[in-house]
Amino acid sequence: MKKDIKNDFPIFKAQSDERPFVFLDSAAVSQMPQTVIDAVSEFYSTYKANVHSGIYGIGMRAVEAYEGARNAVAEFLSADSNEIIFTSGTTASLNMAARMLESRITAGDEIMVSTMEHHSNFIPWQELAKRTNAIFIMLPLEKDGTLSLNTVRAMAGPRTKIIAITHVSHATGAVNDVREICRMAHGVGALCVVDAAQSAPHMPIDVRDIDCDFLAFSGQKVLGPTGTGVLYGKEKHLCELTPVIFGGGMIRHVSAEDSTWADAPQKFEAGTPHAAGAIGLGAALSYIEGIGRKEIMAHERNLARMARRALMNMPGIHLYGPGNEKETSGIVSFTVEGAHPHDVAEILSRENIAVRAGHHCALPLMNHFGISGTIRASFYLYNTEEDVERLVAGVQKAGDMFQV
Ligand code: C6P
């Protein structure tokens, strides 16, 4: 990993006191390098214009930068730019996909999700099933919280119309073989929607290779601005499906009798888009590509392995998830016996260490483990071995306080 990488991210200087700031909550929101902040700031200070209407100098420049960001996202996913819809985040993307696919569902069809999904890849499908009288099915997990391909194979059948699956669990770091799940979905005539919120920031993604029908991720988790996101859809679907949000910037023709739509992706982007955010997202992806996702993944896995090994040897610590390096990403989820996860997070915060604690918007998964929540440390490219040591020392301190 690049040396002194933290210097690229102003937050670390801003939040360090006599102890360096240890940020271990990148699965919730990642920090932004100065280059991304500059790209956003440059838009606002020198060429802020509406990308739909400005036929003047800065308007044209804004369009160019906005479409340039779309091209950057397409390249990042090995997709075509007309398959990239800008949204406000993974939640918006998945809700949009569920609305778009409503016309393809009839009563009695099956819509499947796994028990490890984030609520954002759970509720939209549950609601779609309610609206259409379809059957909502939750794929059960193994004891360690992983999804066996045999389960998908056994449960997917001719009535299955959609399988919505996360690539990487935000709560345990378990990695799903989405390529194989897409293959199984297609084998029974179903579509496969992939939640890549926790994979896109950390590993190479090739939508052609995965062969997913839709894929969603959030800009703020890939070093980009908050309130940005992407919905990738296969060109053939985006051509056929109708928009679910209507307004300016998405029409071909409007009259009293009827209205018709522009081509994809414009027909799915009604209203003034978050151009500054998209431009920042494009800059974030360039920064990531400058380092390389394979290198990022190897670095995070190494840190997570270090953390897991140290925590595993501490009394009263319970680790969740597969824990097997190959099947896990840079997320470590654990509990401290006798301590509420929030209390542990609070103690770590006093040590200037930021982790997330709670149910992580994954209540079905917490039910599966029979717990109310965990403490989650999520690593990213700017974390270091010293960060792991600080985490372990902090957890030790919390353990001592709760007399584990
Ligand atoms: N997970 C976490 O701390 P939004 O909020 O729309 O950017 O992303 C939603 C979402 C969807 N799927 C997965 C797998 C996710 O991890 C998230 C966001 C954050 O884990 C906030 S709960």
Image (tube, rainbow, N blue to C red):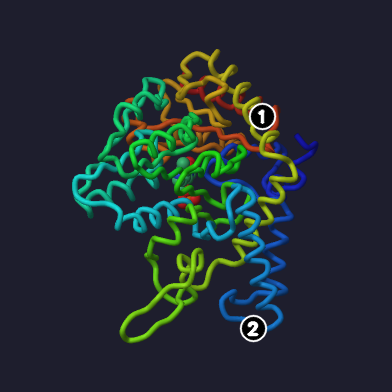
- What is the number of callouts on the image? 2
Disc 2 under 8 Å from ligand 1? The reply is: no
Residue 37: % across, % down: 69, 58
Crowding around mark 2 (Cα neighbors within 10 Å: few <14, some 14 to 19, many 20+) is few
Residue placed at 73% from the left, 46% from the top? 13
Q: Which residue is mark 2?
A: 55
Q: Quadrant of the N terminus?
A: top right
Q: Which mark is residue 184?
A: none
- Say whether residue 183 is left or right of residue 86: left
- Where does residue 95 sit, x and y in percent of width and height? 38, 54
Residue appearing at x 61%, y 24% in the figure: 393
Foreground: 240 or 300? 240
Amino acid marked by disc 1: Ala
Provide residue 376's location: percent of width, then percent of height.
Answer: 50, 33
Helix, strand or loop at mark 2: loop
* Label 1 crowd (10 A; few <14 / some 14-19 / many >=20): some
Between 87 and 372, the one nearer to me in the picture: 87
Report the side of 328 relative to 43 (left or right).
Answer: left
Per the image, label 1 sits on a secondary structure element best described as: helix
Q: Is residue 350 positioned above or below 285 on the image?
A: above
In the foreground, 17 or 41 = 41
Q: Residue at x 38, y 45 (%)?
A: 191
Left or right: 349 as drawn, with respect to 163: right
Q: Is residue 270 above or below residue 68?
A: below
Lower position in the chain sequence, tag 2 or tag 1: 2
Residue type of the residue flagged with mark 2 = Ile
Q: Which residue is mark 1?
A: 298
